[in-house]
Image (cartoon, rainbow, N blue to C red):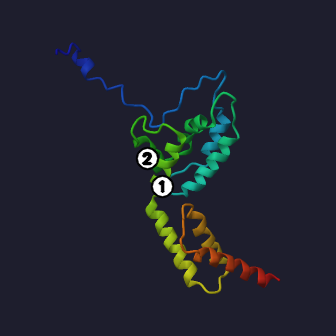
Amino acid sequence: MADNRTMAQMLQAPIEGYEDAIVVPPINANNFELKQPLINLVQSNKFTGRQDPHNHLRFFNKVTSTFRHPEVPNTSIKLLLFPFSLDGEARDWLDKDPPRSILTWDDLVSKFINQFFPPSKTTSLETNSLIFSKNKRKPSTKQGNVFKGLIRQCLTMAYSDTTPTRYFLKFYEFKRSRML
């Protein structure tokens, strides 16, 4: 099959393949637009890949829940705004994701968490919190804050052993008894 393009046409850069990873469903609402103040609010807490991704998602959900349009699902708004909330390593991650590979908000959250808070990190935090809870006899406030931080980071923990929870409750009973 003969290629009838000129040499200049063959040397032009391709115009395909520049689609975003996130597919936003068509929005058929009249007078819908994202206002700059909302974009600025999302950008005020950019995720670079070094912070806690769970905290970023909580902040992002708070911000996006403040904006409502009767004809536009909130998940579409989240899909539109999420790229504005990323910077650095996180932005590179999203840009390298294959075009049209994220079809829903749940897809995006799953890929985001798996990238920036992989199961190996969860296992490490679970282990640290168990070791912490078994090694400390009389907790100090600083130790309690460290332990609370470990527990907070382990959102997916499913302990078969309730030692961390028991220790946590004993810590507060200890602190409360000292205050009385």
Cα separation between marks 1 and 2: 10 Å
Q: Residue at x 25, y 23 (%)?
A: 11
Q: Residue at x 47, y 48 (%)?
A: 111
Secondary structure of residue under mark 1: helix
Q: Residue at x 65, y 26 (%)?
A: 32
Quadrant position of residue 162:
bottom right
Instruction: Point out the residue furthest to the bottom here.
Output: 137
Identity of the amino acid at label 2? Trp
The residue where tag 2 is placed is 93
Kind of residue indicated by mark 1:
Phe
Residue 174, horizontal then vertical, whole percent:
72, 83
Which residue is nearer to you in this view: 161 or 22? 161
What is the quadrant of the C terminus in the image? bottom right
Name the residue at the top extreme.
Answer: 4
Residue indicated by mark 1: 116
Q: Position of residue 20 (x, y in %)?
A: 45, 34
Count the labels in the image: 2
Pinpoint residue 101: horizontal percent, then vertical percent. Answer: 42, 38
* First in residue order: circle 1 vs circle 2: 2
Q: Is residue 125 above or below residue 142?
A: above
Which quadrant would residue 119 be assigned to in this image?
Answer: bottom left
Q: Is residue 20 above or below residue 137?
A: above
**86, 167: nearer the viewer:** 167
Q: Are marks 1 and 2 in contact (CB under 8 Å)?
A: yes
Disc nearest the viewer among 1 and 2: 1
What is the x, y in percent for residue 158?
A: 54, 65
Q: Report which quarter residue 154 is drawn in.
A: bottom right
